[in-house]
Amino acid sequence: MGGSGSKSKGFWPFSGSGSGEEPSKDGNEQSLTRARSFPGATPFVLTRRSSMFFDEDGDLAHEFYEETIVTKNGRKKAKLKRIQKNLTPQGIIKLDHPCIHVDFPVILWES
């Protein structure tokens, strides 16, 4: 009914010891994989890659558009053209509040 927990001494991937110890060699492939994936990691995410960009003027936004005038059949019509050149990514930003990592191996439940 539900869980598939191990009764042997398990390996906690977010121990934070950072000593580089190998997990016990008891044949548990999953704990060995986690050990290599999360050495000394924490369950909290403190930074993330921003999805915003800077343009030449230093303005910050997700997308930039330029208004262009298109003449069709003698009529002038304004169109927006998306700018994709000369944009610099904002980079890594610090989160105001830490979030829990998506690969955190524990189910959180509140009743």
Image (cartoon, rainbow, N blue to C red):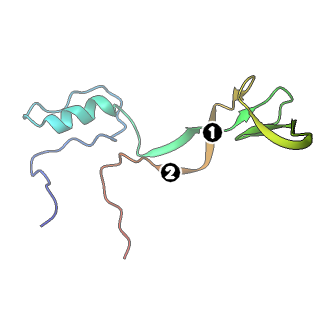
The residue that disc 1 covers is 51
Taking the image as shown, residue 14 lies to the left or right of residue 91, namely left
- Of 75 and 99, the residue lying toward us: 75
Mark 2 or 1, which is nearer the eye? Answer: 1
Q: 17 and 94: which one is in front?
A: 94
Q: Is residue 73 left or right of residue 45?
A: right
Q: Secondary structure at mark 2?
A: strand
Quadrant holding the N terminus: bottom left
Q: Residues within 10 Å of mark 1 (few under 14, many from 20)?
A: few
- Label 2 to label 1, Cα distance in Å? 17 Å
Q: Earlier in the sequence, mark 2 or mark 1?
A: 1
What amino acid is at disc 1? Ser
Residue 17 is drawn in which quadrant?
Answer: top left
Report the residue marked by disc 2. Answer: 99
Residue at image location 68% in from the left, 38% down from the top: 52
Q: Point out residue 56 in the picture as x, y percentages from the top left corner.
A: 83, 26
Using the image as rendered, state which of residue 35 and residue 59 is in the foreground: 59
Q: Position of residue 27 (x, y in %)?
A: 7, 34
| Quadrant position of residue 15 | top left
- Residue 58 horizontal side relative to residue 38, left or right: right
Residue type, label 2? Cys
Residue 85 position within the rendered picture, expressed as x and y whole percent measured from the top left: 73, 24
